[in-house]
Amino acid sequence: MKPDFEKMPRAELKAYVLAHREDAEALRVLMSRRNPNAKRYKFPDTEEGWQQMEEVFRQKIESKDA
């Protein structure tokens, strides 16, 4: 019997999704809870776009380490 994902706290649901990556229903519920005001990045699906995306992620990771 699966847990009730709709009633599960976000942190618990996130942990569940990480442990059960194949569970599409749990992932759907988690993604439906994301912040609508979160910054979104749109990169073209090209080699240059992938490089730009990697650079943005690298900068974010480095800024959190500082």
Image: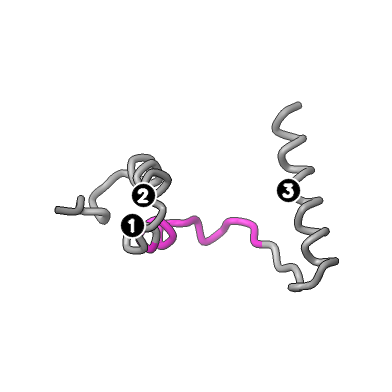
Report helix, strand or loop for mark 3. Answer: helix
**Residue 11 location (% of width, % of height):** 38, 40
What amino acid does circle 2 point to?
His
The residue wearing badge 1 is 26
- State how many labels appear: 3
**Residue 65 location (% of width, % of height):** 72, 28
The residue wearing badge 3 is 57
Determine contact: label 3, label 1, CB under 8 Å.
Answer: no
Q: Which of marks 3 and 2 is in front?
A: 2
Q: In this view, does 30 lie above or below 42?
A: above
First reached walking from the N terminus: tag 3 or tag 2: 2
First reached walking from the N terminus: tag 2 or tag 1: 2
First reached walking from the N terminus: tag 3 or tag 1: 1
Determine contact: label 2, label 1, CB under 8 Å.
Answer: yes
Determine the CA span between mark 3 and mark 1.
25 Å
Give the class, few, some or many, for how many residues have Cα within 10 Å of label 3's Cα (few <14, many ≥20). Answer: few
Q: Is residue 21 magenta?
A: no
Determine the CA span between mark 2 and mark 1.
8 Å
In the picture provided, is 56 more to the left or to the right than 39? right
Give the class, few, some or many, for how many residues have Cα within 10 Å of label 1's Cα (few <14, many ≥20). Answer: many
Report helix, strand or loop for mark 1. Answer: helix
Q: In this view, does 49 lie above or below 12?
A: below
What amino acid does circle 3 point to?
Phe
**Residue 60 location (% of width, % of height):** 73, 42
Q: Residue 20 carries which label?
A: 2
| Range drawn in magenta | 28-40
